[in-house]
Image (cartoon, helix red, strand yellow):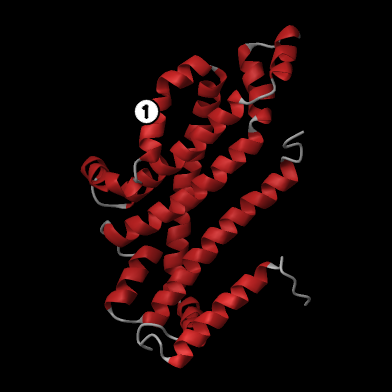
Amino acid sequence: MKFTRSNPLLGAMVLVAIWWLLASIGLVKPILLPTPAGAIRALIAGLANGELAYDLMVTIKRTVTAFAIAAMVAIPVGIALGADVKTYRSMEFVVDFFRSTPVSALFPLFLVLFGVGDQTKIAIAVFGAALAILFNVAYGVMNCRRTRVLAARVMGASQMRTLLDVYFWESLPQTFVGLRNGISIALVVIIVAEMFIGSNDGLGYLLVQAQMSFDMPLMYAAIFCAGLLGYMLNLLFLIIERRFVHWGGR
């Protein structure tokens, strides 16, 4: 395999090398920083015995559920708001206010509204992801080429046809930016919620349990799974975007 400065594996190898060096020279106590090999063994063992695999699948299920709900709500609302600039401007403060508010600060509110359970974790992840998606969709619609919108209206297209055939397709490049942000936010919120909102499964729960029992190899294995999951989800949307939104910027 040929390595160049643009090869993504190069950064991963540098990170592992630094990790191995720190663990080998004892700069950090071994109980706090196991070797990469120790973390990999814990990862393989956790996947083999089902403990890590189960928690990973639970987190994926919650993340995908929250993201799907957020996308189904935010995309049509974002298109409708973006198509009417005056309406969006009147709602802009509300959208920006909650988009700028740390989602973790709203945990107590969602606990009061939904109680302790999966519905709380999913609801707060939906809230955070939906705002990111809505913001990007609305701006994508507002930046549509006016000539295409005017052409559709001249040809007698109704408002609904214009929304579906012009605004939707024109805003897709920006929509995918929102979708990538949304899936990342959903994953982060779900894992944090699993750590602090009455969970008995999920990667967040496993992280806390491994840390409390000083099972550091398992903790690092769970961190690796969370990071890899986020990377793979983002990569998936990049591939879909490049495959189906090839006209972006044209």
Q: Nearer the viewer, residue 214 or 115?
A: 214
Q: Residue at x 27, y 76 (%)?
A: 212
Asked if 178 appears above or below 5 in the picture, the reply is: above
Residue 83 spot, x, y in % from top left: 57, 19
Asked if 108 appears above or below 11 in the picture, the reply is: above
Q: Nearer the viewer, residue 39 or 15?
A: 15
Residue 26 spot, x, y in % from top left: 41, 91
Give the residue type at disc 1: Val
Q: Quadrant of the N terminus?
A: bottom right
How many marks the image carries: the answer is: 1
The answer to whether one can see residue 152 in this image is: yes
Q: Nearer the viewer, residue 97 or 73?
A: 97
Q: Residue at x 63, y 56 (%)?
A: 235
- Judged from this view, the residue extending furthest toward the left is 112
Q: Nearer the viewer, residue 14 or 186?
A: 14
Does 124 sit left or right of 76 as displayed?
left
Does dot 1 land on a helix, a strand or a loop? helix
Residue 240 spot, x, y in % from top left: 68, 48
Does 195 sit left or right of 40 as displayed?
left
Residue 110 spot, x, y in % from top left: 27, 43
Asked if 102 appears above or below 215 in the picture, the reply is: above
Does 179 sit left or right of 54 as displayed?
right
For mark 1, does the 10 Å Cα neighbourhood hold few (<14), some (14 to 19), or many (20 or more) residues? few
Q: Quadrant of the C terminus?
A: top right
Instruction: Give the residue pinned by disc 1.
Output: 94
Does 46 sit left or right of 14 as displayed?
left
The answer to whether one can see residue 202 in this image is: no
Q: Residue at x 38, y 27 (%)?
A: 93
- Judged from this view, the residue extending furthest toward the bottom is 25
